[in-house]
């Protein structure tokens, strides 16, 4: 030790070796990362691994140690990541082409498997894109055009998510969500023809609705007229004299409605009986 203290160069060399050894032995695991420790290129253990059952706030992040020069560390993102898809052309069951712009979100839940199979998150994302694109074309191609533009497609996307998840496990990934951002018809003649068919279908539907409405209106009107006639008959049958008076008043109103009518009748005419106070015998 005394000789070491008397030799500054040797002391500096030992200090430098200690610093290098410490730097090779200790590493910091961020809160948002999972650390896969490789021993001679083979996964040995995982530090700060994603665990959905872990209590809130519990984490393995922080300072960790590894065997220097033998073990290496590969960091894998612990957060949910976006998977932006290229636009896919889908042929519906009614032979219409649709350009679908979809996206997905995924998370690495088995970083050791991911490192062993594809190596990095970028490679995992590329593999998932290929799987998802194939599933989108296959599953959406089983649907009619109207279903692809309706809220019902949410059920189809859930089925696609479940199907992709089955294959995503081989890369240590989990698909969190799959959704369609946009679904458009290709521009040009296809789009114009589709709009024309849609307009024709809506016009036919509107005509059917109007026809049904008119039919129902006629039924309601007929029922109302029948009810009114029955009420009138029941009421007038209870007082025949009032019924005669009422009918006479209706006739007078219709005859003299415009104020220009002139009627010449005999004094004993039935039509004028109500004007005479019903003094004339029947």
Image (cartoon, rainbow, N blue to C red):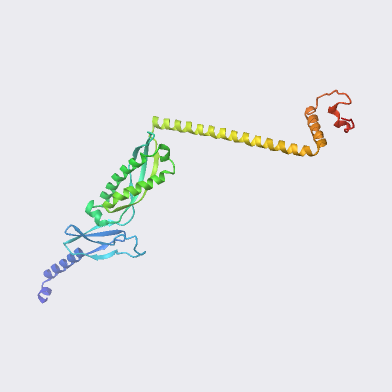
Q: Quadrant of the N terminus?
A: bottom left
User: Residue 249's x, y, as percent?
Assistant: 80, 32
Asked whether residue 188 is in view, the answer is no
Give the residue at x 23% y 52%.
117
User: Residue 172's x, y, as percent?
Assistant: 27, 54
User: Residue 262's x, y, as percent?
Assistant: 83, 23
> Vertically, is 212 above or below 57?
above
Work out whether residue 150 or residue 274 is closer to the camera in this orientation and state it. Answer: 274
Asked whether residue 110 is in view, the answer is yes
Work out whether residue 6 or residue 188 is closer to the camera in this orientation and state it. Answer: 188
Give the residue at x 45% y 31%.
197
In the displayed structure image, the side of residue 219 where residue 206 appears, left or right: left
In the displayed structure image, the side of residue 80 where residue 2 appears, left or right: left
In the displayed structure image, the side of residue 228 where residue 175 appears, left or right: left
Spot the residue most to the bottom. Answer: 2
Give the residue at x 13% y 70%.
11
> Vertically, is 26 above or below 150?
below
Residue 257, by quadrant, is top right
Spot the residue most to the left. Answer: 3
Give the residue at x 67% y 37%.
224
The number of callouts visible is: 0
Q: Quadrant of the C terminus?
A: top right
User: Residue 152's x, y, as percent?
Assistant: 43, 44
> Vertically, is 167 above or below 94?
below
Work out whether residue 217 or residue 201 is closer to the camera in this orientation and state it. Answer: 217
């Amino acid at each position: 030790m005394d000789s070491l203290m008397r030799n500054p160069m040797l002391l500096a060399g030992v200090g430098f070796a200690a610093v290098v050894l410490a730097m090779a032995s200790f590493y910091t695991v961020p809160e948002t990362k999972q650390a896969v420790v490789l021993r001679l290129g083979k996964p040995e253990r995982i530090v700060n691994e994603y665990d959905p059952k872990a209590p809130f706030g519990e984490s393995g992040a922080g300072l960790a140690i590894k065997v220097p020069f033998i073990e290496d560390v590969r960091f894998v993102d612990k957060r949910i990541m976006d998977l932006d898809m290229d636009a896919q052309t889908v042929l519906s069951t009614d032979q219409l082409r649709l350009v679908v712009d979809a996206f997905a979100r995924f998370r690495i839940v088995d970083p050791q498997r991911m490192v062993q199979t594809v190596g990095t998150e970028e490679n995992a994302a590329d593999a998932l894109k290929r799987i998802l694109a194939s599933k989108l074309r296959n599953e959406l191609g089983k649907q009619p055009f109207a279903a692809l533009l309706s809220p019902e497609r949410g059920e189809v996307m859930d089925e696609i998510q479940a199907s992709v998840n089955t294959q995503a496990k081989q890369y240590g990934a989990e698909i969190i969500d799959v959704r369609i951002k946009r679904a458009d018809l290709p521009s040009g003649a296809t789009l114009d023809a589709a709009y024309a068919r849609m307009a024709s279908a809506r016009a036919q539907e509107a005509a059917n609705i109007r026809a049904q409405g008119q039919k129902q209106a006629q039924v309601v009107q007929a029922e109302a007229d029948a009810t009114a006639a029955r009420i009138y008959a029941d009421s007038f049958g209870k007082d025949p004299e009032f019924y005669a008076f009422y009918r006479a008043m209706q006739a007078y109103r219709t005859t003299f409605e415009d104020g220009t009518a002139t009627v010449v009748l005999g004094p004993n005419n039935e039509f004028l009986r109500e004007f005479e106070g019903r003094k004339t015998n029947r």
